Amino acid sequence: MDKSEKTHVLVPEAEITVRYLADYMAASERKRRSIIEGCKYRPLARLLQHKEATITISSAIKSGKPDPKALLKKAEFIRSKLATGDFDALTNEANADYVEKFSEVVASINLPDAEILPGKSFPALKVHGVKMKFSPNLLLRRLDKSNKQRTGAFMLRYAKGKPLGADVGGYQSAAAFGILKEYLPEEGTEADKSICVTLDAFTGSLYPAPGSAVTMFANMKAACQSIAERWPNVPPPKGAIL
């Protein structure tokens, strides 16, 4: 078969990002099936990415006081960038929308009091045979009363015209706390629930890891077991060529 005819690539080993696992936890059974299908069969078609918007917003937050006017100016710059085709124009428009919407809500956002550091990709955490992938947009750090260093994570979410569900935001921040608890002790710092936050850039709502974050993360780990069991039996999307 001609390679150019392929539509999807198969991911043989179960893996899911923290973002999709949060969606999975709050989803109906039907939606759960489609989330796993999307993780197992990656479309080869170019996917609309919000990379420029997330970098713009993360940089603005890291600078200390994001300026709505500067963000609007940046949105206009992204929108008017030279596009080499329809897909590029669509990507520019989507990224400009994201930054523009954030500029409208930024004044109402109260981030926790913490030092803001660049984000990073953590090694995938293997849970019940599933690779859990975690790449927060920023890391947050503070000293507690006993002068001990505490670290948290900041993650952005955005869907055009659609607020993020509070349950999804809570699960995503709980997962951040759970993963940081696994990795940070080696780095001489401890995970801090209060500075593990997910921001909905559409509404400006901030979702910190809930009080029940430890239990929620345990439930997410249990869900990984069921994802691992289902993975081999998930059929490809209709019409997919692997």
Image (cartoon, grey):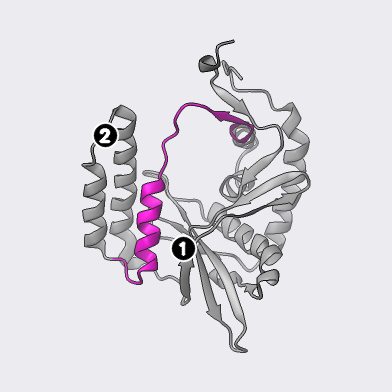
Three-letter code for the amino acid on which mark 2 is drawn: Ala
Q: Position of residue 33 (x, y in %)?
A: 64, 33
| Along the line of sight, the residue nearer the viewer: 164 or 5 | 5
Asked whether 193 falls inside the magenta stretch, the response is no
The magenta stretch is 37-66
Mark 2, Cα crowd under 10 Å, few <14 / some 14-19 / many 20+, is few
Secondary element at tag 1: strand
Three-letter code for the amino acid on which mark 1 is drawn: Leu
Q: Which residue is mark 1?
A: 206
| Along the line of sight, the residue nearer the viewer: 70 or 32 | 70
Q: Position of residue 207 (x, y in %)?
A: 51, 62
Q: Position of residue 152 (x, y in %)?
A: 56, 68
Q: Which residue is mark 2?
A: 83
Asked if the residue at tag 1 contacts the one at tag 2, i.e. Cβ–Cβ closer than 8 Å, the answer is: no
- Which label belongs to residue 55? none
Residue at screen point 40% across, 52% down: 54
- Looking at the image, is mark 2 or mark 1 earlier in the sequence? 2
Residue at screen point 47% across, 75% down: 115
The correct choice, above or below, for 106 with respect to 132 in the image is below
Asked whether 39 falls inside the magenta stretch, the response is yes
Q: Position of residue 106 (x, y in %)?
A: 33, 63
